[in-house]
Image: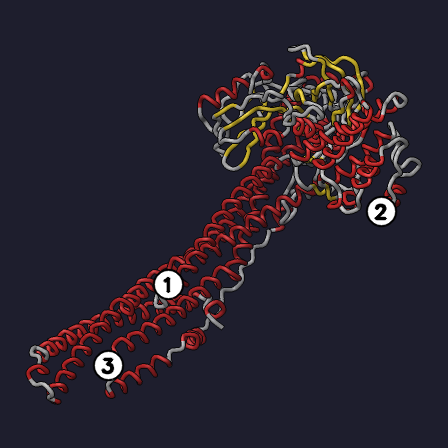
Amino acid sequence: MGFSTELQGQGAHEVLLQRQDAELRLLDTMRRCLASKLKCDREFAQGMAGVAAQATKRDWNEELPDSTLAKAWCSFATGLSDLSREVREGAENLENKALQALKQLHESRRDARKTYHDEHLKIIQRLSSLSEAVQRKRNEYQKQLEVYKTTRSRFEEQYVNLRIFPLAGRTGPKLAEVMDKYQRACRRLHLIHNEYVLLLNEASNYEKDFRTSLLPGLLELQQDQQETTLTTLKKIMSEVVRFTNLSTEKFSEIYTRMNIGVREIKPKEEYQKFAENHKTIPKAQQKFLFDESLTEDSSGKLQPNVIAVDNLTLDWLKTKISELENDQKEVQGKLREKEEVLAKSKLQNGLLDPLRIEISAAETQAKQEIELLKCDDRQKGNQLSLIKNPLNEIGCEEIPPGCDLSLVQTESRSTITMTDTLSAVQTRHGRFQKLFKKPFSGGKKSHSVSQTTLTNISVPGSPRDSSRNSTFLEMTDPLQGVPGARGLGEQDWFHGVLPREEVVRLLKKEGDFLVRETMRNEERQIVLSVSWGNSHKHFIVQNSPDGMVRFEGPAFSSVPELVVYQLKSGLPVTARSQVILRNPVAKETWELNNDDVMLNEKIGRGNFGDVYKAKLRTSGQDVAVKTCRMTLPDEHRKKFLQEGRILKQYDHPNIVKLVGICVQKQPIMIVMELVPGGSLLVYLRNNANKLSCRQLMAMCKDASSGMKYLESKNCIHRDLAARNCLIGLENIVKISDFGMSREEEEYIVSDGMKQIPIKWTAPEALNYGKYTTLCDVWSYGVLAWEIFAKGGVPYNGMSNSQAREKIDGGYRMPAPEGTPPEMYQLMVRCWAEKPENRPKFDEIFRIVNQLFENHRQTAIM
């Protein structure tokens, strides 16, 4: 039992305020009395010091040596001086500790009383305000419902007249006006419905929080503070007794009684009795229920306590979600700040003098504000769920119509030929097209007007309007290209189809920006990316029907003009984001223009697209170009560009060199040096009878040199094999195909075994998905085997599963014919079951280089 359960009624609230006022008066009386006591103690100490000074004015021990009387008097005088000092010190302690603490306690209780009164009034007023708002919104709902019924009745009447007198031309002009009024009334009704649902939700949640957390929490906090105050007061009074105790029998008896009285103070029991004596009935639960009569005549489209999701409310709902999410983030930010402040305050108070107040008025207010913020956070979350759940159920389906225009579908489907009604339809064509331009979706144009019946003319909202022919309504085809893109490709800060990962890497300082292109819903869009705060913001350039482009400010005929305006004006891109453009980030040297690359013959095909031999217009250099198919999803395009991002920072004779990446437009291309010999695997097979052991050893040395370099860069290749190595001039081997590579010391695969080269991959990577550079060491052993097998197939005759099973059982491939024993021994070390038992590439290169030099000297001799 306590405040939170017993004192929720208004009468108890008033009695609690009276109790607090009485306690404040008591504290003030105690403070004034202790101040008077302090004055008396100081006067007493001063008088005692005067007596002691007079008693010791003469040195009686010198004048009366060996006199017991003189010694007794001197001892008495010293006692007086000591007594004076003790009384003075007690008075100082009384002032600096007990009296000061009592003053602070009085001020704190006064502030706490005001805080409690203000917070109690605030939560009561908010509940009352919500209750009044619900009633107002219901009345508004009722009025709009009447308007809706009236306009719907007029629309039905006009539509029936049109069906009865299709050629008389009596109602054509009127129908458009009535239908427009009906649509607007319907949209307003749906919006009010949603506002009413959300308001009911907010009121219900707040009323629940009012009963279960806000008011009980405030009362519980108040009880806790008053109990803490009483505990502190008990300590103060104990200190007063201690500082003023003169240890005489008389005072000892007095102080004993005082201490007994002090010990009898029991804060918990005292306030428990207080609560029992003033127990009241809590306020009855106030229920906020949807008036279901409001939806009875809305054609079944509006349901009680259910958000209406249709083409009339979709934009409003999206805006509402954005507002609620921003508000919730703001509330959560404030909540974290308040909790941090409260935690620091508790920590500081725990280290202070025990006479200081344990719960200050500021802490009381902070705790109540935290409860209010938690309540607000829950309300925002509930409303977001109320909106998002029906939106998520829609998924990728077409948003349902909000108006009851499906009345057209319920009419008779008698086939009236268009030739009989063509003139009437044509007279209304312009008005209908203007009226329904947005809700309609166009179909194919009819080849024979005379065979088209009136039943084929769809009305927005009917299931037929997106699949059947619409004779008098034709939608304009989507624009080819991107509106406002004139001159965009010439700008240094336009990076084409640069992925967002690269954007994050390029934009480092606040205000850095660039412009790029992206695909959304099969539509090309221009995006402005800006570094701002601790994140990156991305703004889609908005296109207007007249071909202009804008953000939130003025419109311009081209994106370059829009960006220059934003940069020079210093105005925020959007009011909500407050993002300001400061520094355009130009394309990097490796970002090439697609037009600078002339594709020639196709020389291969990769996982993401074709590989071409090409030439650079600027330098005439022959290059190899990997292309990315335009139909690939964004995820695959990111993986495609990953190889370019890794290669652009490497420079080693045994690593294929990146020339640049083309992301200005489709198709995306990776441009690399052209290695004339092509694939190492094909070269080995085509020249098997011509290759000497020394040449094969040189190939192994080149591969180990390149992998040693990658190892120093913390790069895990993950797909090292002869098929992914190239052979250049003088049979130099270059490691290529970094599509699966990762720049980290350890990489854990989370997407299963898809596209993993089983026969080249280390057991720990296959079994646990754990990749390190020691996995590449295993693959190097297989590569060396391929080289000395002159393009042979590893684990020939075995399937992937069979090879994996045999490897786990301890099987290792035998040495190819002609392999030096030392080289095969190195292969076996590379295939050690435990990764830590395998050599690193630094050691592998030393071994292979030494074997190569020994073999060369043997060949010379």
* Residue placed under numbered mark 3 in the picture: 246
**In the figure, is residue 809 to the left or right of 381?**
right
Is disc 2 surrounded by few (<14), some (14 to 19) or many (20+) residues within 10 Å?
few
Closer to us: mark 3 or mark 2?
2
Q: CA distance from mark 2 to mark 1?
A: 66 Å
Q: Mark 3: which amino acid?
A: Leu
> Where 748 falls versus 243 (above or below)?
above
> Where 359 falls versus 399 (above or below)?
below
Q: Position of residue 352 (x, y in %)?
A: 37, 63
Quadrant location, the C terminus? top right
* Residue placed under numbered mark 1 in the picture: 352
Q: Mark 1: which amino acid?
A: Leu
* Residue placed under numbered mark 2 in the picture: 808
**Earlier-in-chain disc, 3 versus 2:** 3
The answer to whether marks 3 and 2 mark residues whose Cβ atoms lie closer than 8 Å is: no
Q: Position of residue 517 (x, y in %)?
A: 63, 24
**Most extreme residue toward the bottom, as rendered?**
68
Please tell me which residue lies in front, 264 or 701: 701
Q: Position of residue 164 (x, y in %)?
A: 73, 27
**Most extreme residue toward the right, as rendered?**
797
The answer to whether marks 2 and 1 mark residues whose Cβ atoms lie closer than 8 Å is: no
Q: Position of residue 481 (x, y in %)?
A: 66, 18
Is disc 3 surrounded by few (<14), some (14 to 19) or many (20+) residues within 10 Å?
some
Residue 291 seen from this side: yes
Q: By what rule are the colours in the image chosen?
A: secondary structure
Q: Mark 2: which amino acid?
A: Asp
Residue 124 seen from this side: no
Residue at x-position 91% and y-position 35%: 796
> Where 495 falls versus 331 (above or below)?
above
Mark 1 lies on a secondary structure that is loop
